[in-house]
Image (cartoon, grey):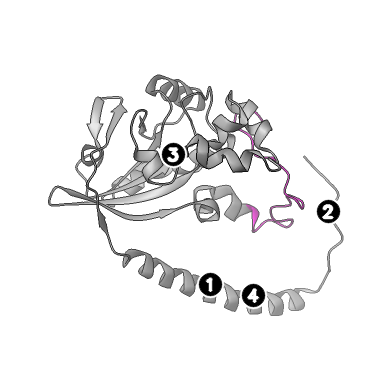
Amino acid sequence: MTEQMTAHRIGTREEYEAARKELFEREKELTRANDELGRQRRELPWVRLEKDYSFETDEGTKTLAELFDGRSQVLVYHFMFGPEYEAGCPVCSSGADTFDGAVAHLNARDVTFLCVSRGPLEKLQAYKRRMGWTFPWVSSQGSDFNFDFGASHTAEEIAPFLERDLGPVPELAVECGTDPAGYMAEGPGLSAFALSDGVVYHTYSTYARGLEIMLGFYGLLDRAPRGRNEGDPPELWIRRHDEY
């Protein structure tokens, strides 16, 4: 899609270099601040899990400890694919295109990466084949796992939100084959766990804009001439990769 570029300040190479040098210093400050945040994130207290969770996987039923697959760390992406969904959330799906290729590199650093959804395993497998992904994806249907880690919500929890302006939710719900209540019962999230001496610990979770790291294309758009260019309020432009 091509559009006429918006009017923008034009300068000389010298003016660009001076402005770029100033911006570079601010980028370095942000990098150092992010490094410090990473250190503080790793120093959060770990919480021992007392509840037993089970998941349906391609290899049968497994416990959370078994999902580590011989490694000491697990990153779980809570993928929005509820029990009534017929297809995964388009936004979660766009992120999967980014992290699908990262799995082997994470495995090399003693980290198992996988997605967890409450949808039935056979639906997850079919959608995964459609999208051409290879990352591990397990079902927590019948388990409290997604509820306990803030990624799934009860009817009572979402009821007040259904009375408000739902924005793009109805459209997204249709794209997933469910209704607004069914769509909003699920939410995205990223949770980290550690396994030590046979004990599983919860070490970190993030939601909302903390998940932008999963959408690798945003970092690239931020460096394009027009940036994200999503409008205000932002337009709902993200599609599954086979729907553009």
Residue 100 got which mark?
3
Residue contact between numbered discs 4 and 3, judged by CB atoms under 8 Å: no
User: Disc 2 marks which residue?
Assistant: 5
Magenta stretch contains residue 24: no
Q: Is residue 43 left or right of residue 206?
A: left
Q: Is residue 53 above or below residue 28?
A: above
Which of pointers 1 and 4 lies earlier in the amino acid sequence? 4
Q: Quadrant of residue 177?
A: top right
Query: Percent x, y for residue 33?
Result: 48, 73
Q: Is residue 35 left or right of residue 181?
A: left
Q: Quadrant of residue 19?
A: bottom right
Query: Percent x, y for residue 211?
Result: 50, 51
Mark 4: amino acid: Leu
> Which image quarter is the C terminus in?
top right
User: Disc 4 marks which residue?
Assistant: 23
Which secondary structure is most common in the magenta stretch?
Answer: loop
Q: Is residue 116 left or right of residue 13?
A: left
Q: What is the crowding at mark 4: few (fewer than 14 residues within 10 Å), some, or many (at least 20)?
A: few
User: Disc 1 marks which residue?
Assistant: 30
Looking at the image, can residue 97 be seen? no
User: Which residues, given as a range, are shown in magenta?
Assistant: 221-244
Looking at the image, can residue 73 be seen? yes
Q: Determine the residue positioned at 80% across, 43% down.
A: 2
Which of pointers 4 and 3 lies earlier in the amino acid sequence? 4
Mark 2: amino acid: Met
Residue contact between numbered discs 3 and 1, judged by CB atoms under 8 Å: no
